[in-house]
Amino acid sequence: PFSEPPKKAAAARASQPASAVTDRRFGKLPRVYVDMKYVLVTGGVVSGLGKGVTASSIGVLLKACGLRVTSIKIDPYLNTDAGTMSPFEHGEVFVLDDGGEVDLDLGNYERFLDIKLTRDNNITTGKIYQAVINKERKGDYLGKTVQVVPHITDEIQDWIERVAMNPVDGTDKPADVCVIELGGTIGDIESMPFIEALGQFSYRVGPGNFCLVHVSLVPVLTVVGEQKTKPTQHSVRGLRGLGLMPDILACRSTQPLEENVKLKLSQFCQVPVSNIVNLHDVTNIWHIPLLLRDQRAHEAILKVLGLWCVGKVPQEPKLSEWTERASRFDKLKSPVRIAMVGKYTGISDSYLSILKALLHASVALDRKLVVDWVPSCDLEDSAAVETPDAYEKAWGLLKGANGVLVPGGFGDRGVQGKILAAKHARENNVPYLGICLGMQIAVIEYARSVMKLRDANSTEFDPAAKTPCVIFMPEGSKTHMGATMRLGSRRTFFQVNNCKSAKLYANANYVDERHRHRYEVNPDMVSEFEKAGLSFVGRDESGRRMEIIELPTHKFFVGTQFHPEFNSRPGKPSPLFLGLIAASSGQLEHLLQRTSGAVSSPTRCIAGPGAPKTKLRMNGLVSTYFANGSSIHI
């Protein structure tokens, strides 16, 4: 069976003829039995077509058919991982439970599929070459000349097969289907070793076990006014010239494809019309899996993979909750304005997970999210002189917002503007959520404004600070940048039972959230802060590392050292983001009554099938709160 370990599956194969293999889930199958099916998603014509969302949506569709799905992202850059890359270069750095700093598309996979991936699910050229060179240094190649073919290409294939078998859905069972996304565009020089490896891999796993979905563009020229197929034709020709033949075409366009355009694509690209799906522009990306379902894309994929038996799909895709959520999103009318105060406001991908977490929470609370991008530099006093128009606009957006969010970041550019944003929120009782650096600057602002410690600062911005409120972590490295921070899922214990954060987490004793930072609040100053009224309601297991701050007298003033956005899901919003949106829309008291009442006893609950759970109805949605010591599932 697909979900059994490879050795057991191999034994099952050997014990019966291939023509009579029977699967307990699908019945008798007219195919050779295999351990894993692979779907490769490539892109052509231009970058930024949405391969990540397409790959995630294919995963959603297959999962809705009853299959276990995992994902792999291939990035053909030489960096070992995304950890040292600027958000201007490649968007946000997504952090996994195991501390892997990876491409933001893995965040799409986790959110859409509700799975937990590992650092090995992100393959880069740097990782592959590093692995091959390490083997060469150890003598694993026995004196052979190490070359791109076969050594690099073999390493890529072995890596894919190995990682595809890792369970990602919380069970000990491997996936049935692995969706692989190849970054970049067909024809890129840096992608060539991966193209060659994947061509070999399709032969290696055999017919019926490999499906190639090619995402391409069908533009409309303004002058002519018709949908043009030539870019896709050239893209497919280039793909075929590299040894890969697309099984399915996913065509991006502004409007639905005309029937004659599909016929033309089918003729020139040699792909059946039934295998051409159109991903036209939609009101929100949650409609993409529904577009694929409505065009029967799952039938096409399952037929190519040999999973379509006697005209019956393993299970008709069950997407009722997904459909309801996508439809609900489109009907939202009551706005909630959140001021996002950061350094990289010119590129929304720099804060992609935060935007998604805000969206998940706002939809759950029946509010239409409006994000006001506020460049932190424009809030500073110097901007009033140098760029007065930008200064006025930034302060106008900040003062007009219902809530303020200051995300994480590195470096001292724009820090003073973030401090001023935190001060505005604190003094005017505006809901505030500070994440990582956003928490640290809130501590600095409190020290300066309330405790009158004028020299308070972080040693990140002033190594010789006279009053170091935020200091470099003892175990950090000052000489190496990559993967030297406090990374991955860490446990935070609540110190105060009746604080807002604990109530939002259903009165759990602790939570597990993901971290990415080098600096922390100075533990030697904590007692002074608490005497002045700032409460450190969450700490790590040692009690010396501060994780969550709150102002008890404020409507909602919360800072977290961890990044709660990385664990937010469309159907399971992050509790702290729910708190921010609720406070910003006048629903916080109502929300806290429900979340804090979800667990009657403050004793620690055990996760799993026996974990206590309470179903509550919030604005028409049934919300289930599991007191599993880590998160709330909504």
Image: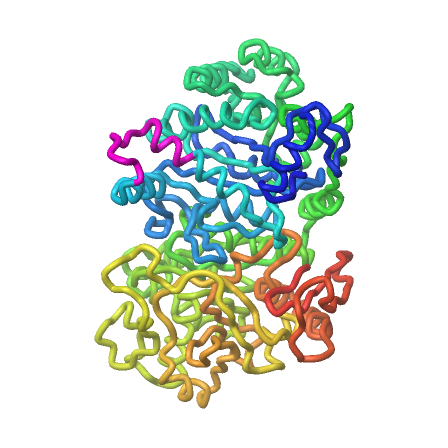
Q: Position of residue 269 (x, y in %)?
A: 54, 13
Left or right: 445 as drawn, with respect to 480:
right
Q: Quadrant of residue 27?
A: top right
Vertical relation: 136 (above or below) 457:
above
188 or 290: nearer the eye? Answer: 188
Identify the image quadrant of the C terminus: bottom right
Q: Quadrant of residue 523?
A: bottom left
Q: Position of residue 146 (x, y in %)?
A: 27, 32
| Magenta stretch holds residue 141 | yes
Q: Is residue 300 visible?
A: no
Left or right: 516 as drawn, with respect to 215:
left
| Magenta stretch holds residue 362 | no
Vertical relation: 96 (above or below) 349:
below
Q: Is residue 111 visible?
A: yes
Which residue occupies the extreme bottom position in the image? 531
Which residue occupies the extreme front position in the image? 15
7 or 164: nearer the eye? Answer: 7
Q: Quadrant of residue 280?
A: top right
Residue that appears at 47% across and 73% down = 547
Q: Which residues are magenta?
A: 140-156
